[in-house]
Image (cartoon, grey):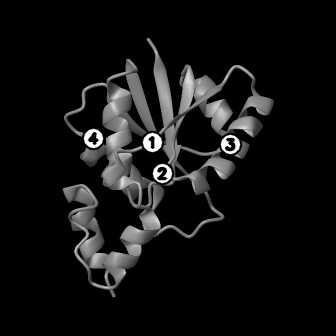
Amino acid sequence: MRTVIYPGSFDPFHNGHLDVVHRASRIFDRVVVAVARNESKQPLFSVDERTRLVRESIRGISNVEADAFEGLLVDYVVRRQACAVLRGLRAVSDFEFEFQLALMNRRLNEQVETLFMTPKDTYTFLSSRMVKEISRLGGDVAPFVPPAVVAALKPRRP
């Protein structure tokens, strides 16, 4: 079984993420959307909340699951017996950072491959940071996130 790990903070999970998941689900036998526990960031949603929101957003895609992890990504990939890491690239500006991460992961474990996928052009501008800002300012985020995330963001508005 060919498993790919799609890691991220997913704070919150948006339609660009979902687009990558849908397309990866057609290529791999199993896709694990892995919510990273990163104590250095101050997320809007807890790891458990983010994992639940991803799980609700991917419901209906039979070969996709949500999970949370902490520690080194390469260790998690080995534990999950995955063949690769999937990273989304929206723009050229994402590439340098993602490329550095991929090289470091390769240095830590040369068996872990990294694949890059771009979202549909309609989502290239979309980021979790923008979604949070639009929501914070009272804007409608429904065009940008799955329904579960819309509902979760409403009570978080100031």
In the image, taking residue 86 as reference, residue 33 lies left or right, namely left
Residue extending furthest top? 1
What whole-number distance in Å separates the C-alpha atoms at marks 2 and 3?
13 Å
What whole-number distance in Å separates the C-alpha atoms at marks 1 and 4?
18 Å
Tags 4 and 3 in contact by the CB under 8 Å rule? no
Residue at 38%, 17% in the rendered image: 29
Mark 3 burial class by Cα count in 10 Å: few <14, some 14-19, many 20+: some
Residue at 50%, 32% in the rendered image: 5
Q: Nearer the viewer, mark 1 or mark 4?
A: 1
Tags 1 and 2 in contact by the CB under 8 Å rule? yes
Disc 3, SS: helix
Label 2: which residue? 90
The numbered mark at residue 102 is none
Compare marks 1 and 4 and give the one earlier in the sequence. 4
Compare marks 1 and 2 and give the one earlier in the sequence. 2
The numbered mark at residue 118 is 1
127 relative to 94, above or below: below
Residue at 75%, 23% in the rendered image: 110
Label 4: which residue? 58
Position in image of residue 153 (x %, y %): 29, 70
What whole-number distance in Å separates the C-alpha atoms at marks 4 and 2?
20 Å
Label 3: which residue? 99
